[in-house]
Amino acid sequence: MNELPRRSLGMALGGLFLVGFAAWLRAEPPAITYVTQPVRHWEAFFVFGEGLGAKKVQLLQGRIEDERSPEELCKALLAGETFNPPSKPPEKPIEVGRLHVLGPQAIGGVLQGGVQVLWAKTEGGISPPFVVNRPEVFFVELDEVAPGEECRVFGRNMVQSFYPPQPSLWLLDRGKKVAHRCEWGNRFDYQGHLNYQLPYELRFKVPDAVPDGAYELWVHNGLKTGLHGFGGPVPLTVRRREASRPKLIDVREHGAKGDGLTDDSPALEKAVLAAAEAGGATVFFPQGDYVLSRPLRVPPGVNLRGFRPSLSRLIVRADVARFSLECPKDSLKGKTQDWAPLFRKMPQMPMVYLISDSRVEDLGFVAAEPAQWCIAAASPKGQIERIVIRNCEMENPHTPWITKDWAPATGCIGLLGYARFCEIRGCRLRGLSGIDHVGTGLKCRMMDNRFSPT
């Protein structure tokens, strides 16, 4: 009576064995389809693919090493060399530690930075290689750029080392078999390894010696990883623009006296408005002292220039005209946004405030209460771009202060926000505070400035 159940049990177990054996024979190697990146030094990451849920799954790691310089690699690219990662892991691969199998299609772990190759290994075999942290270039800010013009390129993994970052950007002309190295601009913004914007955005300038034509733009991450350190290409056209003489607007043509005894604010506002209506121009201040009774707002694209900082000065004189902290409603509305709400939140105002795309050169400033800055730059969006202040002399006798609400301190120059692509150079600043910055990270070039407390 018990023979039949035993025979049935044996057949069932044999069937299960055959099914498992057939499944083992049919087991396919895993595949990696995507890895979260960039993966910096000892950061967590995730691997996605198929067949990753096996009990004995391993993630093998191999490094790419190539001692060739970027110049030599550019020649290799022009000669037709291609990217070929190793198809199999090395004899002694590094196994990625702290591995967590999240399911048949996902693995989590911790990985060191740098360009690396990953393989997933299971009982079914080894996956094809997957390169991690190789630079990728998505697009360029401008399709056409002139030599000396600043441009930005966007992507990911474009910078791997932050000690210090050493990327390089190259223009390749495949027809002439020539490579041109561009000037990398972010080096002026570097503040140590905390600048995590660099892997995604780089700015550069095309050298003056580059001929007009169509090029391929490539980005190298600065590591010794051969062609896997390059990302690209994206097309970029270099074309010189016809030189045009900048329009110059003299403030005296709009009624400014510059005698130190007349309120010149209305005349200066007219000159600034004329420069804005001209699509951007330079407002010129001949020799003289120009008294301000309220802040002078400068729209984007309008520049201010004097004859010499000791001879062309903007001043505040209470005996001539009391400086008002109110932002007047003027005809600049429509030419630029109304920036008054930003400053109405504060009890202090600048003599001149800038927004973006403006230059101030060869001018002198003498502040007095209640004007709290000689120049302040601000934007409602919190980002200040392309402000240049050169060869200016500023004097501000105010004592720096800060309130419990973190209101900005006073100073000669105030940058009220996230400053980028800005420059302050060759200025003489007198007062207890020279340059004040309130924002998330100072990103501007400050060179050859002189500070004096008195």
Image (tube, helix red, strand yellow):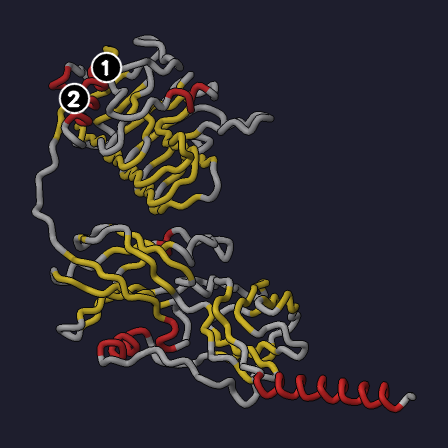
C-alpha distance separating marks 1 and 2: 9 Å
Compare residues 210 and 123 and report the one nearer the observer: 123
Return the x and y of residue 397 as percentages of the image width and height. Answer: 43, 24
Kind of residue indicated by mark 2: Val
Return the x and y of residue 262 as percentages of the image width and height. Answer: 23, 11
Specify whether residue 110 is in view: no
Kind of residue indicated by mark 1: Asp
Residue occupying the far right of the picture? 1
Compare residues 318 and 359 and report the one nearer the observer: 359
For the C terminus, which image quadrant?
A: top left
The label shown at residue 264 is: 1
The label shown at residue 251 is: 2
The label shown at residue 67 is: none
Compare residues 346 and 49 and report the one nearer the observer: 49
Q: Residues within 10 Å of mark 1 (few under 14, many from 20)?
A: many
The residue depicted at 41 percent of the width and 60 percent of the height is: 156
Q: Are marks 1 and 2 in contact (CB under 8 Å)?
A: yes
| The quarter of the displayed image where residue 204 is located | bottom left
Depicted 55 relative to depicted 374: above or below: below
The residue depicted at 32 percent of the width and 30 percent of the height is: 354
| The quarter of the displayed image where residue 166 is located | bottom left
The residue depicted at 37 percent of the width and 12 percent of the height is: 324
Return the x and y of residue 327 as percentages of the image width and height. Answer: 36, 16
For the N terminus, which image quadrant?
A: bottom right
